[in-house]
Amino acid sequence: MNEPIYRLRDVCMRYDSRDVLQLSTLDVARGEVLCAVGPSGAGKSTLLRILGMLEPPTSGRVSFAGQPLPAAAPLELRRQVTMVFQRPILLHGTATYNVAYGLKLRGERDTANRAAQAIERVGLAHLAHAHARTLSGGEMQRVALARAMVLEPDVLLLDEPTASLDPYNVSLIESIVTDLNRERGTTVVLVTQNIFQARRLAHRVLLVLGGRDVEVAPTERFFESPSDPRTAAFVRGEMVY
C-alpha cells in the first residue's frame, strides 16, 4: 500500500450526547480508491466530513499528508480536497458558471476553457449554457462532479454520487471516477450503499456499522473471505445493524 495521505487514530465524533462515529484506526493510501459501505446512519457521511476538513472530530487524531490537522485546517490543505455531496447544491446560473466558480475564487486563469473541458468530460457539453434549475438530478450530479474535478484535487470525496440515478448516469460517473484515479492518481473516498459499486470501483472496502469500523480490506478479500462475520453477513445482503 502506498504511503497514507490520511491517518486517523481513535477518532470520535459526538453530536450532543450521542457518538455517531468511533474509529480506532484508519489509513487512506495516497492514490487509492477506498469505498465505505454500511447501512444508512452508520456514520459514513460523518467520516467524509472529517476527511473533507469540514468539521474536526470531537476527539482523536487526524493527519493529512503527514501533517496533524488542527481544528481549523489551513486553506492550503483544504484546497487539496474536494467533496461532492449526495444532493449537490448548484448556484444560480448556468452549468458553466457553476463549474468555473471555484476556479474564479482561486484566481485561476483560463477558467472558461477549463470549465468547458470539464463539462465535456461529464457528457454535458450540450447543456453548458443551460440554467442549473433546468437540469435533471443526474445532470446536476454530473455538473457537481465537473465542478470538483476541474480543481484537480489530490483527494476527491464522494457521498453516494450515484444514488437514485439511472444506469447510464451511474456508468458514466463510475467511469469518470476510475479515469481520474488512473490518470491523475487522485485519491478517492467514496461512500456507497451499493456493494456492487464498491466491488467495481474500490481498491479497498471499509465496512462501518453503528459508527464503528468493522473491517477494512482489499476488495477481493473483503467480498470473498472477510475476517469478520458481520462483514460476511453484510456482503450476503443480510440486514446488519
Image (cartoon, helix red, strand yellow):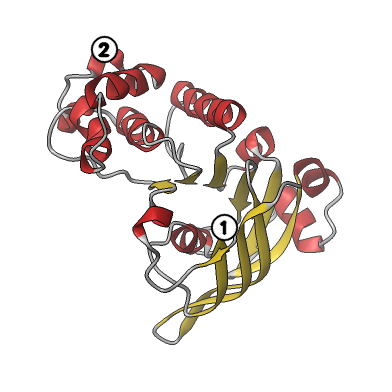
Secondary element under disc 1, as helix, strand or loop, is: loop
Q: Which mark is residue 157?
A: none
Q: Where is 138 relative to 220, above or below?
A: above
Q: Between residues 168 and 97, which one lies in front from this camera angle? A: 97
Q: Residue furthest bottom?
A: 17
Residue that numbered label 1 is attached to: 39
Picture layout, residue 10 above or below residue 69: below
Residue 76 lies in quadrant: bottom left
- Residue 84 vs 69, above or below: the answer is above
Does any portion of residue 237 appear in the rendered image? no
The residue at the far top in this view is 126
Percent position of residue 170, x then y: 49, 28
Q: Which mark is residue 126?
A: 2
Question: Looking at the picture, how far across and down is residue 144, in whole percent?
Answer: 33, 36
Q: Amino acid at mark 1?
A: Pro
Asked whether the beta carbons under mark 1 and mark 2 sit within 8 Å of each other, the answer is no
The residues tagged by marks 1 and 2 sit, at their Cα atoms, a distance apart of: 37 Å
Residue 140, x across and y down, in percent: 30, 33
Residue at the image position 58 percent from the left and 25 percent from the top: 183
